[in-house]
Amino acid sequence: MLPQFGTAVRKNPNKNLNKAAAGEIGGGAADQASVDAAWLVLEAANDLGDHAAIEACRRVIDAELNGTVAGSADVDLVLGYFR
């Protein structure tokens, strides 16, 4: 019997589908947009000395890096920062 290709990388091919059905996967592009915005806001907040915005940006970025969901208040602050 020949070995199947990709079995070392993907042990459960339906894992992401199961997560999507359970609502465990975030919005994808929307989550990435908030992280990209967080990096821009973080730079501006550092320049302005806005410590509350700096902490909110760090929480949004950390949540993305840890695979968790950022708090809605932090995401709202980041996305509305330049308005």
Image (tube, rainbow, N blue to C red):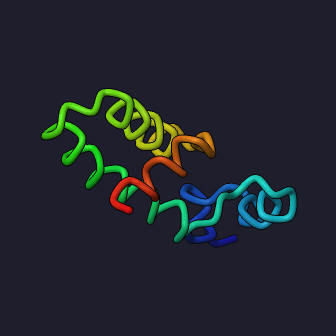
Q: Quadrant of residue 80?
A: bottom left
- Residue 27 percent location from the top left of the image: 63, 65
- Can you give x and y, in whole percent of width and height, for residue 70 in the image? 57, 42
Q: Residue at x 47, y 47 (%)?
A: 77
Report the number of discs: 0
Q: Residue at x 56, y 43 (%)?
A: 67
Question: Does any portion of residue 68 appear in the rendered image?
Answer: no
Horizontally, residue 3 falls left or right of residue 56, namely: right
Q: Residue at 54% across / 57% down in the picture?
A: 9
**54 vs 19, nearest the viewer:** 54
- Farthest residue in the front direction? 83
Residue located 57% across and 66% down the image: 28
Against 25, residue 4 (above or below) is below
Which of the image's four quarters has the C terminus?
Answer: bottom left
Res 27 seen here: yes
Q: Position of residue 30 (x, y in %)?
A: 55, 67
